[in-house]
Structure formats: C-alpha cells, structure tokens
Image (cartoon, grey):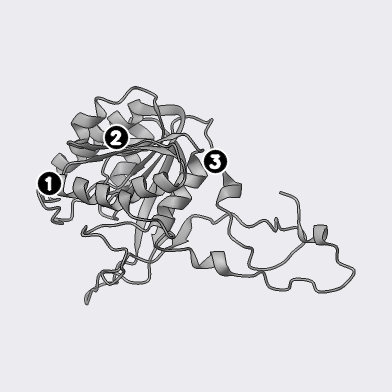
C-alpha cells in the first residue's frame, strides 16, 4: 500500500486553516457531542451558544477544504444534531443527501424515559455532482426476486453495527471509539483509492486505520497527544479483519430457485 497517513497533533480549528482549499475528497467528522465526556486533556462541555459557534467555525473550515465533488459525514447525538443540520443546510448551503441512523443494541441505561440506542450521521455533498460507489457497499438481498439486483441491495439509511465494547480485544482506551466496519462503509461509498480523506477529530484513529487498509490517503487531526500516540501504535498493529460487521452481510437470499432449468444469469436482475 502506498497511501499516506498524516496525523496532526493540534486543535481542529487551527489545523484546518493549514489545509489547502478544495483538496479533500471525503470528510468523516465525529466531533464532541457536548455531553461532558472526559477526553484526557479536555472535557466535552461548552455553553450552548459556545458549542454552536464552535460547530459553525469548524464546519465552515471543513466546507472550504472539501472538494467540489466531495462529501462530508458528521456524527452527532440527538441534542445538537438538528442545529448541525441547519448549519450544513442553511448557513453553508450544502446539498443534503442522507440522515443516517446508526442503531446499536446496547447503550446507556435509563429508568425514566427510553434508553438511547442510536447515533445520527448527517451526509451532505458540496455540490450536486458527487461520487457514490453503491456497488462497493451493497448487502445481500433478503429475498430472491428476478427484478432485484442480486449483486446486493442498497444498505439504506438505518445501519446496525455493534459498539466496540470494553471487553472487545480491539477496544482502544477512548470513550467514543467507532466501529471500523461502519467507517469502512462510509469510505468505500464516498471515496476511491488514492483519494484524500480527512478526520478533524481523529480520537482513537478508526478512520485512519480504515483508510490505511483501503488504500486511501488520510489526514487525522487530534488535540490530545496521548491519543496521537495511541493512533500511531494502532497503525503499526498487524491487520486481521475489521472489528465489526453489518449482520446483513452474512445473510443468504430466501427463495433461491433450485430448478435445473434456471440459468446462472437468471439470478441477476437489472440495476
């Protein structure tokens, strides 16, 4: 692999200023959710207006560095996701593509009210012209029908990936580590080999690790020097497989024909 992985130990707002305009093909951003989590050398807890100003500032810079045919994915919790949508849609005038729900089976417990079991991912394009590699992210069909594309179905906008639990041997010492297979889907769908991917809040380095394996160039910005060391060590580890999967990838379409008069090409429908 000849891809370049660059880790910048710096505040995201200042580091983004040093990146060339229109130079990034894909941005995957998992900013602090402003829920008070402890990130070692800083706490994720700003005043309401302060957090919105911070969000607007980094998103403006992200918009500047994104290529005209590029895509940004932004992870966010329910408290602020609508405000970030407004920034992307109204203040920056980006092209709304998808509001993705990442569903996970375990999460925070709650006795008064319903326990949260999802995060939101906002997908916006910088222009009406953008790359999207559907064939790279299809999942097996649930049922066989001749009209279906039997190379697989569009995974839709509700994704099920397990959290990387604390008992998982792939778990890093970071409070909000994202599953590699989730990031893999984003990278495969919205970039090509050799493209440049940017993660302005690199955290445990999942985006960089995935790009390393998928032959993408990547810039990761991370404020905490301890996490930078963690990322560098993670990138040196031997790769075996991504640490999670979409459970649909293992399914076999029901009602597959077994008649002798069915030709192999009959299993494939039109795109």
- Residue 126 quadrant: top left
Viewport quadrant of the N terminus = top left
CA gap, disc 2 and disc 1: 17 Å
Q: Residue at horizontal 25%, vertical 60%?
A: 172
Pick whichever of labels 3 and 2 is earlier in the sequence.
2
Helix, strand or loop for disc 1: loop
Residue 59: image tag = 2
Please state the horizontal and vertical placement of residue 198, each as a whole percent of the image: 35, 37
Which is more toward the observer, 193 or 29? 193
Marks 1,3: beta carbons within 8 A: no
Circle 2 crowding by C-alpha within 10 Å: few under 14, some 14–19, many from 20: many
Residue 241 vs 208, above or below: the answer is below
For marks 2 and 1 on the same chain, the one whose residue lies earlier in the sequence: 1
Inter-mark Cα distance, 3 to 2: 22 Å
Check residue 128 in the rendering and tell me which mark sits there, or answer none.
Answer: none
Q: CA distance from mark 1 to mark 3?
A: 35 Å
Q: Residue at x 32, y 63 (%)?
A: 170
Name the element at disc 2: helix
| Callouts 3 and 2 close, C-beta under 8 Å | no
- Say which mark, if any, is on residue 46: 1
Residue 203 visible somewhere in the drawing: no
Question: Element type at marker 3?
Answer: loop
Q: Nearer the viewer, mark 3 or mark 2?
A: 3
The x, y position of residue 196, in whole percent, is: 41, 34
Q: Is residue 266 left or right of residue 143?
A: right
Q: Which residue is mark 3?
A: 132
């Amino acid at each position: 692999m000849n891809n370049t992985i660059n880790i910048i130990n710096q505040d995201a707002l200042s580091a983004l200023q040093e990146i060339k305009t229109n130079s990034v093909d894909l941005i995957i951003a998992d900013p602090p959710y402003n829920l008070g989590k402890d990130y070692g050398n800083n706490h994720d807890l700003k005043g309401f207006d302060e957090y919105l100003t911070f969000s607007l500032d980094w998103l403006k810079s992200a918009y500047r560095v994104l290529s005209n045919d590029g895509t940004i994915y932004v992870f966010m919790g329910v408290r602020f996701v609508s405000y970030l949508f407004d920034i992307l849609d109204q203040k920056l005038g980006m092209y709304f593509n998808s509001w993705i729900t990442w569903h996970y089976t375990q999460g925070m417990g709650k006795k008064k009210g319903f326990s949260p079991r999802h995060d939101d991912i906002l997908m916006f394009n910088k222009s009406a012209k953008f790359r999207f590699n559907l064939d790279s992210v299809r999942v097996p069909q649930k049922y066989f029908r001749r009209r279906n594309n039997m190379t697989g179905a569009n995974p839709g906008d509700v994704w099920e990936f397990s959290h990387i639990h604390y008992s998982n041997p792939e778990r890093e010492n970071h409070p909000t580590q994202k599953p590699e297979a989730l990031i893999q889907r984003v990278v495969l769908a919205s970039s090509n080999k050799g493209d440049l991917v940017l993660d302005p809040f690199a955290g445990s380095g999942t985006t960089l690790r995935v790009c390393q394996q998928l032959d993408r160039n990547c810039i990761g910005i991370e404020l905490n020097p301890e996490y930078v060391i963690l990322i560098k060590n993670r990138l040196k580890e031997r790769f075996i497989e991504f640490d999670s999967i979409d459970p649909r990838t293992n399914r076999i379409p029901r009602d597959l024909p077994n008649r002798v008069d069915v030709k192999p090409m009959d299993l494939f429908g039109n795109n």
